[in-house]
Image (cartoon, grey):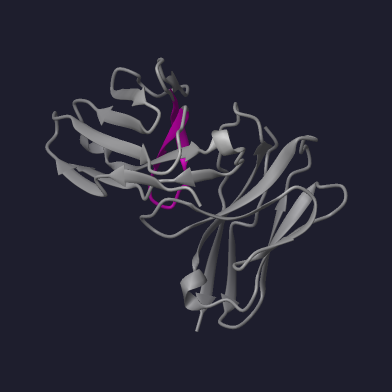
Amino acid sequence: GAVVSQHPSWVICKSGTSVKIECRSLDFQATTMFWYRQFPKQSLMLMATSNEGSKATYEQGVEKDKFLINHASLTLSTLTVTSAHPEDSSFYICSARDQDRGRTEAFFGQGTRLTVV
Amino acid sequence: LAKTTQPISMDSYEGQEVNITCSHNNIATNDYITWYQQFPSQGPRFIIQGYKTKVTNEVASLFIPADRKSSTLSLPRVSLSDTAVYYCLVGPSGGSYIPTFGRGTSLIVHP
């Protein structure tokens, strides 16, 4: 199947700093990528839809100025958590669909564990 | 989007067959049914997808009745490594589809 790679797998940062998470589609082009957040024992919650070459679409309640999304190429989307606070500690997951080949299923990155201290 | 309902948890033993059913009463004509598996601290992994009747791959089988209002993921002869959360998603094949997750089913396989 198609491969989506996320980096880093885990990161620890100090409160008030910013952290960037990268999501790459390795063997296909993705005009759209999705960013999720997952808290312990909970399901994945969609944060935003990342669109190549245009602004991301954020879900209700997600602060667009805090979670900056950039989708500058067909294989890379980045999520920057700005001025991170301990409550932003979570598991962040990206996803993409290989729409060019008519694939209907989504492929997910391995996730990024963010811990803000 | 069609809402899905799954059991919150299931228990099984090694070597048994496990069947997880998902209800999706308002599934649309162009919706597919997709199942994912997620281990702790990992992203979901695609297991199987189907539209109607039965689909089988090297990992699982997916049974979909004629009315498509439910589906059953069947895992043959589970092992301890099948302990995970299983999610059922329903959505169209079109480009605008956004994968949206329900609560999933936490499967625990006992020795």
Q: Is residue B41 visible?
A: yes
Span highlighted in magenta in the image: A32-50
Residue B39 higher or lower than A54, as above or below = below
Q: Position of residue B5 (x, y in %)?
A: 67, 48
Query: Per the image, is A43 magenta?
Result: yes
Please tell me which residue lies in front, A56 or B80: A56
Q: Is residue B25 left or right of A48 when viewed as pictured?
A: right
Q: Position of residue B91 (x, y in %)?
A: 66, 37
Where does residue A69 sit, x and y in percent of width and height?
33, 24
- Where on the picture, by quarter, is residue A81? top left
Q: Residue at x 16, y 44 (%)?
A: A12
Q: Is residue A57 above or below residue A20?
A: above
State whether residue B99 appears in this view.
no
- From the viewer's perspective, tell me whether residue A98 is left or right of residue A9: right
Outermost residue toward the top in this view: A54
Depth order, front residue of A39/B31: B31
Q: Position of residue B107 (x, y in %)?
A: 55, 66
Above or below — where is B53 with respect to B16? above
Q: How many discs mark residues in the rendered view?
A: 0
Residue A21 located within the stretch drawn in magenta: no
Split into 4 quadrants, where in the image is the N terminus of chain B?
top right
Q: On the rendered structure, is A15 left or right of B43?
A: left
State left or right for residue B8 relative to residue B50: left
Q: Residue at x 64, y 66 (%)?
A: B60
Instruction: Judge by depth and name the residue closer to the eye, A21 or B83.
Output: A21
Q: Main secondary structure of the magenta part?
A: strand
Instruction: State the residue at coordinates (46%, 73%).
Output: B81
